[in-house]
């Protein structure tokens, strides 16, 4: 129980510090913290339950070369000055693992991330080390700068892809989780809204349109006054239309989408309104088609003439100028005259 509480506090503190830090960006009083739910995000272990570094096996071989944290940090800085990048990375990591609570550990962890990013050009590992820096040393570092570094590397990973045996592969899931890690640790950052747009877009690339919709909706709810929220409104409309196309007809889903589109058309700009108007036409056409087929169901030998007339009249009350209105009026006239086939 105590261990769980400590992890919960470790998760919430970084976001709080970012939101109120004098040197950082400001956020409204409704700021969310890392422990709050972000619909559409994965419950990824490295984002929710970070693991503390421990000394490696065979530590007498892989451990630090010096006898104290201060001496080890001085040795690491010498390796950096000599541009012995790989060796510096190994020794900085060894310092953090061996003397995790020392005053030198935060500096070593930050140097480790910086060397990986700037000198070795390993964006994936650099991102992990900046994330670790924030998770365990938030009080001893420039939190805003570290969070910005995470976001910068996430953007780079999105362009580069994932390296496997010297080849680059697109890895949407890992990249999306990287952006999620950024938002969870710095929800008040000036780039947080853009990061959420990217997360939703990556969800769409995965074909997870329902999850993308959750992210778009959450972005609009928590940052409704920003330009990204306006973009999210139109993108959410597009994602909802993809859901309709992918999963086929479902009356509740269609009517829910219609309600959303009607509301969205009143809140978006001219370009967005043009797109949403087209979507509205498509959805209304689907509903009219369903209503027409439903009315025809009552126009059969198995049903009474009275029920068919009632069904067609109800259809015309809803779609007096629809594409089936002339057909329905003609058939209704036949039924009422008694000239029924």
Image (spheres, grey):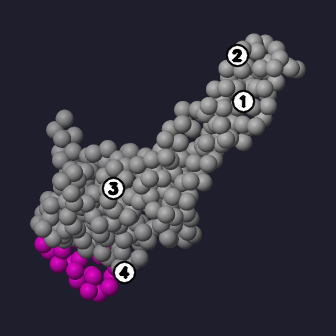
Task: Pick the quarter of the image with the C terminus.
Answer: top right
Q: Which residue is denoted by mark 3 in the rendering?
A: 224
Q: Is residue 77 magenta?
A: yes
Q: Which residue is mark 2?
A: 307
Q: Which residues are magenta?
A: 65-90
Image quadrant occupied by the N terminus: top left
Sequence-first tag of 1 and 3: 3
Q: Which residue is located at x 39 percent, y 62 percent?
A: 228
Secondary-structure class at tag 4? loop
Of circles 1 and 3, which is in front? Answer: 1
Q: Position of residue 137 (x, y in %)?
A: 19, 61
Mark closest to the chain's N terminus, 1 or 2: 1
The residue nearer to you, when weighing 6 against 199, is: 199
- The location of residue 129, given as percent across then percent down, is 31, 64
Q: Earlier in the sequence, mark 4 or mark 1?
A: 4
Residues tagged 3 and 2 counted as in contact (Cβ below 8 A): no
Q: In the rendered view, tell whether residue 200 sits above or below residue 251.
A: below
Q: Is residue 132 left or right of residue 120?
A: left
Q: Is residue 191 visible?
A: yes
Image depth: mark 3 or mark 2 in front? 2
Distance, label 3 to label 2, CA atoms, is 48 Å
Indicate yes or no whether the magenta region holds residue 227.
no
Label drawn at residue 119: 4
Q: Around disc 2, counting alpha carbons within 10 Å, would you say few (fewer than 14), some (14 to 19), or many (20 or more)? A: some
């Amino acid at each position: 129980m105590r261990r769980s509480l400590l992890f919960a506090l470790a998760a919430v503190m970084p976001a709080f510090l970012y939101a109120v830090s004098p040197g950082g960006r400001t956020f409204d009083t409704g700021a969310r913290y890392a422990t709050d739910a972000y619909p559409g995000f994965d419950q990824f272990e490295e984002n929710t339950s970070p693991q503390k570094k421990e000394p490696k096996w065979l530590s007498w071989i892989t451990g630090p070369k010096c006898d104290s944290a201060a001496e080890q940090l001085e040795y690491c800085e010498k390796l950096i000055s000599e541009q012995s990048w790989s060796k510096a990375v190994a020794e900085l990591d060894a310092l953090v693992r061996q003397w995790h609570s020392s005053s030198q550990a935060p500096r070593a962890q930050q140097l480790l991330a910086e060397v990986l990013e700037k000198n070795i050009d390993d964006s994936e590992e650099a991102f992990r080390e900046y994330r670790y820096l924030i998770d365990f040393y938030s009080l001893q570092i420039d939190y805003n700068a570290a969070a910005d570094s995470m976001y910068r590397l996430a953007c780079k990973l999105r362009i580069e892809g994932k390296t496997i045996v010297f080849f680059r592969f697109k890895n949407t899931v890992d990249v999306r989780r990287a952006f999620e890690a950024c938002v969870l640790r710095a929800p008040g950052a000036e780039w947080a809204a853009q990061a959420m747009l990217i997360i939703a877009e990556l969800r769409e690339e995965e074909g997870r349109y329902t999850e993308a919709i959750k992210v778009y909706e959450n972005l609009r709810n928590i940052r409704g006054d920003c330009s990204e929220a306006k973009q999210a409104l139109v993108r959410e409309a597009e994602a909802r239309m993809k859901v309709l196309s992918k999963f086929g007809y479902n009356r509740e889903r269609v009517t829910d989408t219609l309600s959303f589109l009607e509301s969205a058309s009143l809140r978006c700009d001219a370009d967005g309104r043009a797109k949403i108007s087209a979507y509205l036409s498509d959805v209304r056409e689907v509903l009219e088609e369903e209503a027409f087929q439903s009315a025809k169901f009552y126009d059969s030998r198995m049903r009474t003439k009275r029920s068919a007339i009632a069904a067609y009249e109800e259809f015309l009350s809803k779609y007096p100028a629809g594409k089936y209105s002339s057909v329905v009026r003609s058939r209704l006239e036949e039924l009422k005259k008694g000239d029924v086939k």
